[in-house]
Amino acid sequence: MSWEGIFQDILRRSKTLRYVTAVSAFTCSRMRPDGFGGMAVLITPTAVVGKSTSHIIEDFLAEAHLDEPAALAA
């Protein structure tokens, strides 16, 4: 069982908690392109959802329509 599953089990039994959030950072002792960033996770009794910081940036670019070919050329 993952740590998310443990929190989800607690939430299922709780009469007061509706959700738990977690924010984590990725660090590395060497300069690596994939060695930094982070993620955020939302845990509810019925779902676990999360995104890394790179996925959040991709979402922001899509919302601003900057991921489209015409925007990339500009």
Image (cartoon, rainbow, N blue to C red):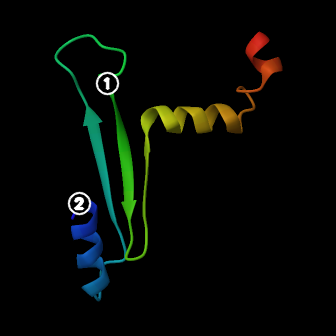
Residue 66 percent coordinates (x, y): 72, 26
49 to the left or right of 21: right
Residue in the picture at 54% in, 32% down: 57
Foreground disc of the pair 2, 1? 2
Q: Residues within 10 Å of mark 1 (few under 14, many from 20)?
A: some
Residue 12 percent coordinates (x, y): 31, 82
Element on which disc 1 rests? loop
23 to the left or right of 57: left
In the rendered image, which quarter is residue 51 located in? Answer: top left
Going by the picture, which residue comes out furthest to the left? 29
Q: Is residue 71 at all visible to an observer of this figure? A: yes
Residue located beneath label 2 in the image:
2
What amino acid is labelled 1 in the image? Phe
Element on which disc 2 rests? loop
Q: Distance between the residues labelled 2 and 1?
A: 23 Å
What amino acid is labelled 2 in the image? Ser
Against 45, is 50 above or below? above
Residue in the picture at 83% in, 19% down: 70
Residue located beneath label 1 in the image:
36
In the rendered image, which quarter is residue 67 located in? Answer: top right
Residue 13 percent coordinates (x, y): 26, 86
Against 2, is 29 above or below? above
Locate the C terminus and report the quarter of the image it occupies: top right
Going by the picture, which residue comes out furthest to the bottom? 15
Residue in the picture at 23% in, 60% down: 2
Residue 62 percent coordinates (x, y): 68, 35
Q: Which of 1 and 57 is in front in this view?
A: 1
73 to the left or right of 41: right
